Amino acid sequence: MSAVTVRVPAKVNLQLAVGPLREDGYHDLVNVFHAVSLFDEVTASEPADGDAGEAPLRVRVEGESAGEVPAGDDNLAVRAARALARWAGRSYRADLLIRKSIPVAGGMAGGSADAAAALVACNELWGLGLPLGDLMEIGADIGSDVPFALLGGTAVGTGRGERLTPLPTSGVFHWVFALAGGGLSTPRVYGECDRLREEAGGPVPRPTASDDLLAALRKGDPHALGRALTNDLQPAALELRPALAATLDAGRVAGALGALVSGSGPTCAFLAESAEHAAALAKSIEVADDCRSAVTASGPVPGASVAG
Ligand code: ATP
């Protein structure tokens, strides 16, 4: 095999409960991940013979926001491929091409998605045959969202978010995502969350999964799910980017069943009743000042998989 292309979904957090700051600088989380049909593609190919002597792993990024993604050793896809080669105990070569559609620094885990896709693509290209569990272990060292991008579907993550349990769901949920210009740094949003909590005083409760949310997912009830969506990072994201409040309001006024900031933002997610409702909602949301474009998607979808 000389080239392998893998398609990998973005995630939205249906519940993001953030516990108190730990001694090690992380937070305990309860993170309900949901994979949606907004995909990046990563192709891993064998470098041409004439390229011998070049770096063993090279990356090229295509797509609207390609300029915002590091195109060297810092790229999360390169880091993942390097970690895989190390795990296999050999030096391997690959050229990686990333076609980005997931917003960069948008709170939809696009970088982690590319890392997951690179693991699946290089596992295949190099004929390693590692099982999903091994790829998830390697991925967890790259970033806490990488194991979910491999697994897909809907799952609850605990610890730093990396200990995953798949959740039963029924049916399909329809979404609109309002993409903003530019991104928000995840560490900055967590820092702001800590600052706001310190200012407010009082204890921060231990994070627990919402029973209402889990029941809504099991039943496939979008109205109940819309009411149960929560994100503890939302106040911090709104503090850092106040214009997002108007984007969320535009969706609520237009009849979204639920509206929230996705992860650390600035992408906002809106739940719709049907595909038609999502298309209509997208038109109303797109006019908000801080919305660059609104895209529709559905979930859950499978994790990183070789494109057929
Ligand atoms: P999360 O939701 O996991 O907090 P995010 O969606 O907010 O993450 P990403 O798009 O994953 O943010 O990117 C965060 C940063 O990681 C980017 O600003 C970029 O500098 C860096 N990065 C490294 N590799 C990649 C990649 N392949 N795609 C996107 N960003 C990457």
Image (cartoon, rainbow, N blue to C red):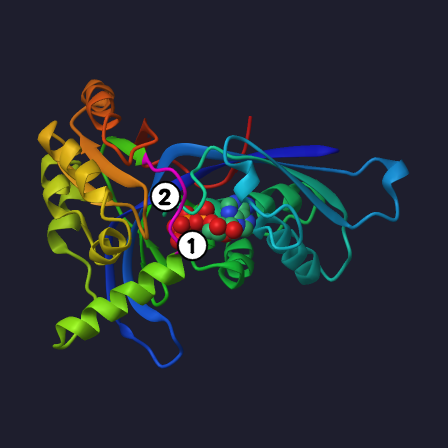
Q: Which residues are magenta?
A: 179-185
Q: Is residue 72 visible?
A: yes
Q: Is residue 150 visible?
A: no
From the image, which quarter does the N terminus lie in? top right
Residue at image mark 2? 11
Q: Is mark 2 within 8 Å of ligand 1?
A: yes
What crowding class fits label 1: few (fewer than 14 Cα within 10 Å), some (14-19), or many (20 or more)?
Answer: many
| Contact between labelled residues 1 and 2, with CB atoms less than 8 Å apart | yes
Residue 254 lies, in percent from the top left, at 12, 27
Q: Main secondary structure of the magenta part?
A: loop
* Residue sitting at x 41%, y 38%: 302
Residue 276 lies, in percent from the top left, at 21, 18
Most foreground residue, 141 or 177: 177
Residue 145 marker: 1
Q: Amino acid at mark 1?
A: Asp
* Residue sitting at x 19%, y 64%: 208
Residue 259 appears left or right of 96: left
Q: Amino acid at mark 2?
A: Lys
Q: Is mark 1 within 8 Å of ligand 1?
A: yes
